[in-house]
Amino acid sequence: MNGHERRAAVTKEAIKDAMLSMLERSPFTYITVASLSREAKVGRATFYTHYTGLTDVLDELADDAINATKSAAAEGLSGIATLADQMRKTTDPGELAPYMDLLPVCQRVADNPKYKVLFTDSFVSEYMLMNIYRRESKKMLPYIRKNTHVTEEEADKIFLFGVTGAFAVNRSMGWNKDQSWYRVQRVLLTFLEGGYEALRKL
């Protein structure tokens, strides 16, 4: 990376960090390019050198947040089965900690303190959710089709249901992983596991 690229990377990090900081204090709909530039201590012209608008910043933050999550040791349906099996044995957070990488990506992203704010703003949280859905569907749809023999459209809707459902449940519980959360997850994962098993028999 040359000097120009390093300066650009530093500037973009400052803008993204400023966005996260501002979201802690105010809704996304109140943030403007001017206010974000002031927060990041860059000029508006500098902002537009790197981004065409505020949602471009969110896109990069979504990528950063997803890339910062640990990859699951087992993907897709096998991950659901593994995690459900462990949760049937225990709902103790300490004992389940090694298996949390098997959670849906939106839950893993929200576990990162730096990016949790992306799930507390109503506009940004929906934007993040659709970002995750679009990104992860490329990997998950072929996996679902292979393991359940459903059509591409059906696989898409199954995955959308899973992503939005997991998101809605976690938002309703404040993204807090207490004992109640683990019990609810055990029930939901068992439900999902049974559903996928039924689809294999269609």
Image: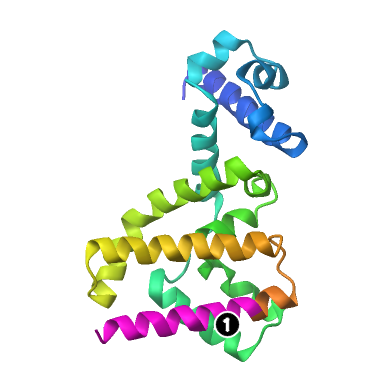
Direction from residue 33 to residue 176 in the image, left or right: right
Is 198 one of the magenta-colored residues? yes
Q: Is residue 36 magenta?
A: no
Numbered disc 1: secondary structure: helix
Total marks in image: 1
Q: Is residue 146 left or right of residue 46?
A: left
Give the residues drawn in magenta, as a range: 184-202
The amino acid on which the numbered mark 1 sits, given as a three-letter code, is Val
Residue 86 in view here: yes
Q: Residue at x 55, y 38 (%)?
A: 61
Q: Furthest-bottom residue in view? A: 89
Q: Quadrant of residue 47?
A: top right
Instruction: Give above or below for 95 relative to 50.
Output: below
Identify the image quadrant of the C terminus. bottom left
What color scheme is it? rainbow
Residue at 24%, 62% (x, y): give it.
152
Residue 25 placement (x, y as % from top left)? 77, 35
